[in-house]
Image (cartoon, rainbow, N blue to C red):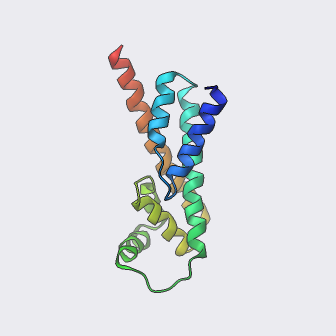
Amino acid sequence: MSDILSLASLFTSSFLSATLLPGSSEAVLVALLVAGVGPTWLLILIATMGNSLGGLTNVILGRFFPQRKQSRLQGKATAWLTRFGPAALLLSWLPLIGDLLCLLAGWLRLAWGPVIFFLCLGKAIRYIVVAAATVQGMAWWQ
């Protein structure tokens, strides 16, 4: 597979992984790191961009939901967002919980600047940790 297609597949997988659709962006990132497709920083950047845009898609979708009575699970996530504000989006990388946090951030109409900052930071930290563990593991096996 060409490098461009590999990077595009990483972006697509990262984007889809941030939505309710299934995806395994960490596996794609690890595979590309092991294959030596590109510099580590570029792979982290592409994965972070795709996953962040997917998360922001959830925020935008959340803004379309009318503000009505909320379920019990929404109540807990809303309490987190109310208590910690946009900083709770540092956990937006978590499966399912992160999707709900992003949707609720939009539903609560949180300010865009802090939402984008904390959402991107949380997702970047996850990919940095995965990449660092992969690179360390590769060095250990050599």
Q: Residue at x 38, y 31 (%)?
A: 133
Spot occupied by residue 60 in the image (x, y as percentages of width and height) = 61, 66
Tell me if I can see residue 110 in this picture.
no
Residue at the (44%, 55%) spot, across then down: 90
Q: With respect to residue 28, does 95 lie above or below?
A: below
Which residue appears farthest toward the right when viewing the image?
4
Q: Which sits in the foreground, 118 or 38?
A: 38
Of residues 124 and 29, the one nearer the viewer is 29
- Residue 58 picture quarter: bottom right
- Residue 73, quarter of the rendered image: bottom left
Q: Residue furthest bottom?
A: 69
The reply to whether residue 129 is in sight is yes
Q: Residue at x 47, y 50 (%)?
A: 122
Where, quadrant-wise, is the C terminus in this rendering? top left
> Which residue is outermost to the top?
142
| Percent position of residue 115, x then y | 55, 61
